[in-house]
Image: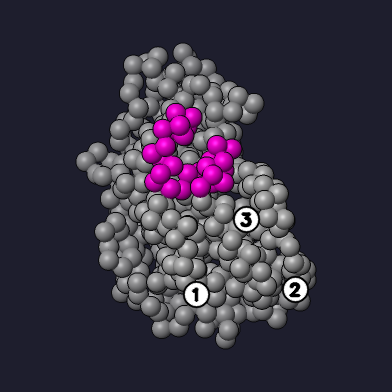
Amino acid sequence: MTQRPMSRRSLLKNAGITAATAGTAMAVGPSALATKSPYFFTRRQTTGTIRVIMIADPWVDTLTTLGADYEAATGIKVEVESFPYDQTHQREILLGTQQSDSSDVICLDSPWVGEFAEAGIVEDLKPRVDASPDLMWDDFIPSYKAVSDWNGTTVGVPFAPYYVLTHYRKDLLDAEGIAAPANLDEWKTIARTFTNNAKYPGISGVVMNNARGAPVGQAWFEYLFNVGGKPFESAFPGSPDAYSNVTPLINSPEGLMVADLFMEMLQYEPAGALNMAWDERAQAFASGTAALMSEWSARTPLLVDPNRSQIADKFATTTFPALPGLTAVPPLGGWVLGINAYSANKDAAWEFIKWVSTGEPHKKFITLGGPPARLSELADASLVEQFPWFTTIAASAETAYPDCRPRIPESFQVIDTIGNALSEALAGSISTSDALNRANDDVRTLLEQSGYSVS
């Protein structure tokens, strides 16, 4: 993987780290953060306790349950703190800038891998992985295991991979004699069919992520490869080095095609569509008011819970749609478990990470609603019977691209920049072409200033 003139670790030491806060990039150094940040960490680590910081995703309670199991087995307590997406990133960055040991295990989203590795916030786990045959490293799903690697280092254990699956109302499609969508054109036709259809009152064709910043910014990347596009000159499936030439192609014809697709699909979405993010999208589909939803597989278990879903026995899944004639590139994401470089409890943190990622503990994690991470789990007949969408996950994993969302240190800012521009276009403030031209210029400036090769 291409190295830049100055590493993120050097930037952290010499000038502070760039942290994204609520969609705004703010350059701050450790001393400034220590005095001004509302999240300044003062708590010190205590023996006999492992502290985990993570996203407030659906499986938080499951990890807490496993923590209780671990304490019962070892006597070591596990404390889990969880926060919304942007706040998780902010707090985890501050562990590094403040050199804090207030958390031991850091749960990282895949686009943050490069940022945390180069800033030295997480320990390189490769020596531990190599010395731990009981972790069964080769059993992790290959397309997501690749996410945990950064320039030859292992940033975290690929504990919770997500794949975006197309969820569809099987009962509605069956009633109309329509098959599951096999490509993007069929997906659009289904959305149109069930919008303002007198036979299906109260049903919208589709629910999507349109909210400002990361929600719609990430969505743009999800669709881009599936219309034949790429975000940077060297970032595409099969590329030997996704970041050797990061000349941005955000305003390419394919990039504009995705933006225009988002505009087109608004007419098939429910009221309030511009404010929908991950939770709102899943809740709308679970309420039975939409025919289609492309959603991360981590939220699929919520849909089969009759206490939280009105369509528990009425939906099915298929792989993410691409344009006819293209091989689909199902969006890939999820979380890796890393060790805080400043933790005073690294060995204990590693033992917990191994335990929770392996064997019966991880199988229990899955049965309680967590995402599968291993090939053996996707092939486990008892799990597939309980969770039939595992078949779709297995198919998605075959052609997923680890860099479908960038993993460079600037990823958070790149995604936010695109998402903020798209949000203005979807609201009608500017045209889609003007939005992407501005985003392309802003991303180009960011990457040039960061020392990348941009032509």
Main secondary structure along the magenta-highlighted residues: helix
Residue 258 in sight here: no
x 57%, y 43%: residue: 365
Q: Secondary structure at mark 3?
A: strand
Kind of residue at badge 2:
Lys
Q: Which residue is mark 1?
A: 118
Residue 287 screen position, x and y as percent: 58, 26
User: Would residue 138 be counted in the magenta stretch?
Assistant: no
Residue most extreme to the bottom: 14
Kind of residue at badge 3:
Met
Q: Nearer the viewer, residue 206 or 125?
A: 125
Compared with 448, 301 (above or below) is: above
Q: Give the residues in magenta.
A: 359-387
How far is the residue under mark 1 from the one under mark 3?
Answer: 20 Å
Left-right relation of 64 to 454: right
Q: Nearer the viewer, residue 304 or 36?
A: 304
Question: In the image, which is nearer the foreground, mark 2 or mark 3?
Answer: 3
Residue 186 in sight here: yes
Q: Count the marks: how many? A: 3
Q: How is the image coloured?
A: one colour
Q: Which residue is mark 2?
A: 36
Compared with 279, 308 (above or below) is: above
Kind of residue at badge 1:
Glu
Residue most extreme to the left: 325
Q: Earlier in the sequence, mark 2 or mark 3?
A: 2
- Residue 54's label in the rendered image is 3
